[in-house]
Amino acid sequence: MELKEKLVEMEHINLTYNRGKDNAFQSLFDVNLTIKKGEFVVILGPSGCGKSSLLNIIAGLEDPDEGNVRINDIDILKMKATERIQFHRSKIGMVFQSYNLISTLSVLDNVALPQIFVNVRKGERERKVMMLLERFGIKEQWKKVPSQLSGGQQQRIGIARSIVNDPFLVLADEPVGNLDSASANNVMQILGELNKQEGKTIILVTHNPENADWGTHIIYMKDGKITKEEWKDAAGASREVQSKAEEGKSVFDKIMEKFRGLSEKQISFLMEPLKAKLIAESFFIPYEENQMKVIEESIRLKMSGVYSEQNLFEQLDKPMEKGGAGLDQRIAKGFTLELEELARAATEVFGKHTSEEKAKFVINYFIQKRNIHIPEDSKAKVADLIRRRIDDEIPFIDFRKLLDVPQDAGGAGLNKQTVHKILRELDLILIVGFGLKIEPEKNNTNINNPIKKI
């Protein structure tokens, strides 16, 4: 089948669940979207924003209330049920968060299942499956059942199954949501290779902003609407363009250089709105401009001691028409707790502890609170590098390099995604902690507001 340049076209899509009933809920509002052949699309948004509903409509698994859906210039909504099933089986592959493997079938039979539905002979389908299993590094597991495998291995099986019929479109619904960072990175690399090497169009749904790094077309969703779209060029250039002179500096380094010559108290005062903005951008996908302003101001007031934890939660949860940020209650509560953890981390790093104690605390914070996977054999090296970075013994460019360098060459040997997370999280701690007045701890179990304005 010859593929059209505009592979997926959606116009004026509306979708309501339980339509006509008391519990009716509209999931999508007048969505218009064009996806081109060969794009790696990342649909990004919080839980409940409609991104999975959008994916299901593209897959032909749900019909919208209104609108048009064309895939490769074929109107799938006008297809008969049997035609749509056949189209889905042969042209679309799906990868799921929960893997959706059949527990009683072997790895080989799970991957081969889609081939049975398109009448491929046993010998031919088994040869193709074994080639895919070898490609994804799981050939030795072909006789095992899913329960005998790790989450990362099961997801690789899920990807193999999704492409065994050679579809031109692969849809992935939170494919790394249940995986540790190493397995998640491996799965994302596989999807990236399918896109770059085979030219398959990938549409991936996620709530994690870090996964947007893999996409060439980023779609931001909120409350059933597309709020923003971004594209990367063919070279994969970052949306944030830096000059060569700035590449070896962290955000913290640049701030300190910008404020050089000022007193610590002056810097602390000037950094308040900047801290709030950086925190908001690190924890939230881009919302509407008015919402982001409320979020940033709420964070600033919390950081300066004006707001309590409860005040912050209430302002984030309050509807926009009443002057709040209008966030989902779970998101508002989760962020409030995460900000408290970040504040505690900042007080520890800038408190009266030894450098070794600070580094140990940061490592534990990364692992326990920020879900960053650091291999056991790398922890000592990472802790030493963090200690040296906190003590300003090592410039940012060397810190970044040594986190990535293999262990046998003197580095920590971390994968690039983990390095990116550590750089970002440590930068946040240093930015938030700079200029803080650390109160003596009255006890170690209840710190209601560890940050006070100078």
Image (cartoon, helix red, strand yellow):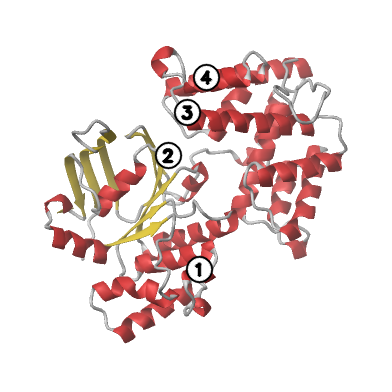
Observer able to see residue 253: no
Q: CA distance from mark 2 to mark 4?
A: 20 Å
Please state which amino acid type lies under the numbered disc 1.
Ser
Which residue shows up at 17% across the image and 44% down it?
A: 68
Q: Is residue 205 left or right of residue 187?
A: left
Q: In x, y percent, where is residue 401?
A: 70, 51
Please tell me how crowded label 1 is: few (under 14), some (14-19), or many (20+) other residues with Cα within 10 Å: few
Q: Which one is closest to the eye, mark 3 or mark 2?
A: 3
The dot on residue 147 is 1
Please tell me how crowded label 3 is: few (under 14), some (14-19), or many (20+) other residues with Cα within 10 Å: some
Mark 4 near mark 3, Cβ–Cβ under 8 Å? Answer: no
SS category of the residue bearing label 1:
helix
Mark 3 near mark 2, Cβ–Cβ under 8 Å? Answer: no
* Quarter of the image that includes the C terminus: top right
Disc 2 marks which residue? 47
Disc 4 marks which residue? 314
Q: Is residue 60 left or right of residue 379?
A: left
Q: CA distance from mark 1 to mark 2?
A: 28 Å
Decide which of 232, 319 is in the foreground and name it. Answer: 319
Of pointers 3 and 2, the one earlier in the residue sequence: 2
Q: Is residue 176 above or below residue 242?
A: below
Which residue shows up at 50% across the image and 32% down it?
A: 331
Please state which amino acid type lies under the numbered disc 2.
Ser
Observer able to see residue 230: yes
Of pointers 2 and 4, the one earlier in the residue sequence: 2
Q: Is residue 181 left or right of residue 325?
A: right
Disc 3 marks which residue? 329
Q: In x, y percent, where is residue 412?
A: 73, 56
